[in-house]
Image: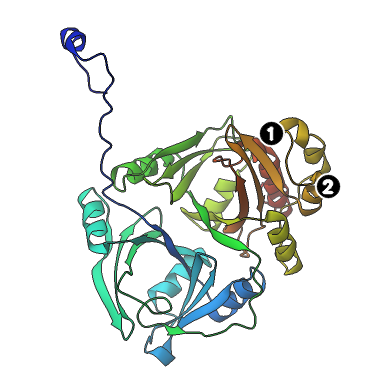
Amino acid sequence: MSALSHSASSRASTHAVAEPPEPDFLPLKGTDHVEFYVGNARQAAYFYRAAFGMSLVAYAGPETGQRDRASYVVEQGKIRFVLTTPLRSDHPIARHIARHGDGARALALWVDDARRSWEETTRRGAKSVTAPYVLRDEHGSAVLASIQAYGDTIHTFVERSDYTGPFLPGFRAVESDPVARPVGLKHIDHMVGNVGWNQMNEWVDFYARVMGFSLYQHFDDKDISTEYSALMSKVMANGNGYVKFPINEPAAGKKKSQVEEYLDSYPGPGVQHIALATDDILLSVTKLREQGVEFLHVPHTYYTELEGRVGKIDEPIRELEELGILVDRDDQGYMLQIFTRPVEDRPTLFFEIIQRKGSRSFGKGNFKALFEAIEREQAARGNL
């Protein structure tokens, strides 16, 4: 509320008048896709199809006129990953992989107007990576533009209202996938970035000032700590809440935190994990385990105290313990979550499987159990 003098306040109406909301200068329709730069896209695509149950829906490479790289598009529900590998060792993508290993490069956002999205964000201080450009083929046209985010991560705005093809112009449809074994994953719930010491607020400001996001939740080192390590996190969300970006930074502790290990191994800021939503986490995790996905281990003591902490829930605690699923509650309901081990040989990218039953939280009550599980993994790697 704007400041008023005492005399002006006394003359004001006794009826509260709500100020009109600020217009959303960057309306987002959701996450369009995540592009990963990988050393072998054919093999990476097979992993996500066989293990995570995603379907191969499109391909671009030398056979389609894309001479410098090969890209495989895999989908499940509204989740879309693009796995891209360079075809020459001197390609910029090859240099990205040499530095970071396999990892997320582009967090692409679905918009109605990519040109305006690029103009609004660059006008507010975003660094342009690629100015708006148009792609066309027999299925129509799409407009794309990109800006820089933390580290070597970018945001690509994708406008596809005039396109009816399988992914984007230049990609060839794959009609069926005999490898895919779906596990019930629906959409991306949130994507988490790790940034360096004392950089969290810088990137919180970026998402607020440049992209119009607002602070959704905040956790400090008192919330996220164990005997040995700690971190701090702020969750930024866009106007309609479709896109959420938690930003983590290290905090001082006795030993190296998981964020420090990531920053050393990646190296530098990057995407730590991607949360994939399901409507039936017991079914999804059972299938994922059967298909070879490895999850962090949670000790028995977590489950002996669970009902006293979160109250009655629909799921049998015995089944949750067998699968290693965590539960947390807020004032709007509860949520269930589980975290994979890193899916690369470097301890960098991992995935979260999440089911929300009213809760809007990010599992604050599970932080200690989760981070102790991660620390056991760090200790096994000699990195704690």
Q: Is residue 178 visible?
A: yes
Q: Which residue is at a point 43% across and 78% down the rendered structure image?
A: 166
The residue lying furthest to the bottom in this view is 63
User: What percent of the width, then of the height, locates residue 264?
Assistant: 54, 53
Q: Which residue is at a point 76% across and 67% down the rendered structure image?
A: 290
Q: Judge the density around disc 1: few (<14), some (14-19), many (≥20) Cα neighbours within 10 Å.
A: few
**Marking on residue 227:** 1
Q: Is residue 87 visible?
A: no
As drawn, 14 above or below 138? above
Q: Check disc 2 and give the amino acid type.
A: Arg
Q: Which residue is at a point 25% across and 30% down the rendered structure image?
A: 19
Which corner quadrant of the image does residue 350 belong to? bottom right
User: What percent of the width, then of the height, locates residue 270?
Assistant: 47, 55
Per the image, label 1 sits on a secondary structure element best described as: loop
Does 303 sit left or right of 122 as displayed?
Answer: right
Q: Check disc 1 and give the amino acid type.
A: Glu
Task: Find disc 2 in the rendering and name its residue.
Answer: 318
Alpha-carbon distance for marks 1 and 2?
28 Å
User: What percent of the width, then of the height, locates residue 96?
Assistant: 44, 68
User: What percent of the width, then of the height, locates residue 38?
Assistant: 51, 72
The answer to which of 178 and 129 lies nearer the viewer is 178
